[in-house]
Image: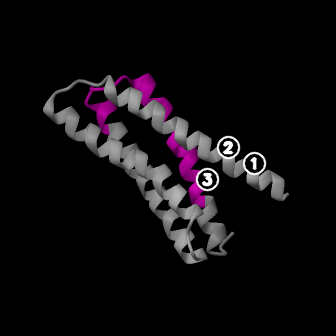
Amino acid sequence: MQNDKAKFKIDFKKRLYNFVLRLIAFLDKLPKDRITQVMVDQLMRSGTSIIGNYIEAQASSSRKDFTNFFNHSLKSTNESKLWLAILRDSKRASVEEVDWFLKELEEVGNIFGSSILKLRGRK
């Protein structure tokens, strides 16, 4: 059981890291107009914050602190979904690419949400 848990943590961190690398490549290809760049900046912050807070959680000093970092990751996940949807719906990004990111963020968000519930003893 412990081995599965450790493997999941490693795989999840890799998944988040690869998500950020793909996000950077995606954002780099978007139009360079002022409006798009504002959204790109916001998405870059929220998208990279997901893994940043996850990494910080690993070094947290208490269960409460750990849970708070996971909560911040979940909030960044939700914010990233908003910026991606706006980029898609304003036709600044392709539906296919954005849909991959939205699906990935939905899965990641579910993992964080489930983890938070377990940490708070509600599941």
Q: Are marks 2 and 1 in contact (CB under 8 Å)?
A: yes
| Residue 106, horizontal then vertical, whole percent | 53, 45
Q: Is residue 32 left or right of residue 118?
A: left
Q: Earlier in the sequence, mark 3 or mark 1?
A: 1
For disc 2, the marked residue is 11
For disc 3, the marked residue is 111
For disc 1, the marked residue is 7
Q: Quadrant of residue 44?
A: top left
The answer to which of 121 and 12 lies nearer the viewer is 12
Instruction: Name which residue lies at 36% across and 38% down.
Output: 84
Q: Hey, what amino acid is under mark 3?
A: Ile
* Residue span colored magenta: 86-113
Q: Hey, what amino acid is under mark 2?
A: Asp
The correct choice, above or below, for 83 with respect to 78 in the image is: above
| Residue 105, horizontal then vertical, whole percent | 50, 43
Quadrant containing the C terminus is bottom right
Instruction: Name which residue lies at 51% across and 61% down.
Output: 56
Q: Hey, what amino acid is under mark 1?
A: Lys
